[in-house]
Image (cartoon, helix red, strand yellow):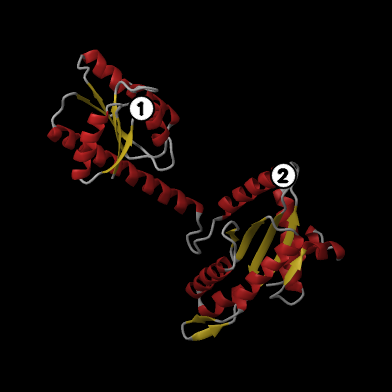
Amino acid sequence: MKVLVADDSIVSRHLLDVTLRKWGYDVVGASNGTEAWGILAGPEAPSLAILDWMMPGMTGPEICRRMRESRMEQYTYVILLTARNMKEDIVEGMESGADDYLTKPFEQAELQVRLRAGKRIVELHAELLRAREAIQHEASRDSLTGVYNRNTILAMLQRELARGSRELRPLGVVMADLDRFKAVNDTYGHLAGDEVLREAARRMQEVMRSYDAIGRYGGEEFLILLPGCDDASAYEQAERMRHRLCEKPVIIGSVPYDMSGSFGVTSVVPSPTTSSEQLIRKADQAMYLAKSRGRNRTEAAQATSELGLDSGAAAFLTSTIA
């Protein structure tokens, strides 16, 4: 575990460095408070810190206060070292945000025990962070396919529209629907249908860029966000996903099933008034046009406009095409 030793005394810093390395710690040194704060505020801040009280630039308590006020996500356990031993000094040091306090001169065994306690606190905090991240991950994901759930993908769409509006950057939106999916459930059962959905999500993700996003919109429908894609590039990306989807059968038990999907594509350079609902509606209409033209194909939103396919027509297609 990494430990910061901040002390303006070269002798004290060297003695601590030798001792801590002997105990198996990875030591980082700082000769003044300003240098110490720079290390603690950096991206790879040590998990433990031993700070001398009086240092040039910033004192140990000042560093503690700044650390706690900044509410860094990674917790650093801080031990203050000082020759001060009055009760008022101890109170001041602890109120500044220090976790522990040692007066000089100190016994090495005492420091080792304090560091061991600090290590346990840091490890417990890391476990809590991992647990929180796991909960957040589960809350944002569809439990069956592992892609984003409906609420999360819609929230991501709002964020991408806002970013695209700021950066004048296009956003591609794709609606994908597995063809004849009801027949899978009716013929092979719902467990087979679940496996087809999982495999469909996996295959589409394989050809997506790292910064694209896919979510299960409902049933066998998936909503896909393609930042930076205009009409042509969004169409090309949808075609890559469609080809990957149907390039080989899914084995259900011992029976091969030819999976395919219909894709609807639209794109926009967002403005502050761009409506996510309208974008989804356009992609949805294009997807149902793909179904009406034979399934296993990709259609762009412009085609729906050319045919005069409004929301009423799309609703009709929804009810008549499986």
From the image, tell me which residue sits under label 2. Answer: 165
The one of 69 and 184 positioned closer to us in this rendering: 69
Distance between the alpha carbons at the discs numbered 2 and 1:
45 Å
Label 1 packing within 10 angstroms: few (<14), some (14-19), many (20+) = many
* Quadrant in the rendering for residue 293: bottom right
Of all residues, the one furthest to the front in this rendering is: 10
How far across and down, in percent of the image, does residue 140 sit?
50, 52
* Quadrant in the rendering for residue 49: top left
At numbered mark 2, what does the secondary structure look like: helix, strand or loop? helix
Q: Quadrant of the N terminus?
A: top left
Q: Quadrant of the C terminus?
A: bottom right
How far across and down, in percent of the image, does residue 218 sit?
59, 60
At numbered mark 1, what does the secondary structure look like: helix, strand or loop? loop
* Quadrant in the rendering for residue 214: bottom right
From the image, tell me which residue sits under label 1. Answer: 32
Amino acid of disc 1: Asn
Amino acid of disc 2: Ser
The answer to whether residue 315 shows anywhere in this view is: no
How far across and down, in percent of the image, does residue 132 sit?
40, 46
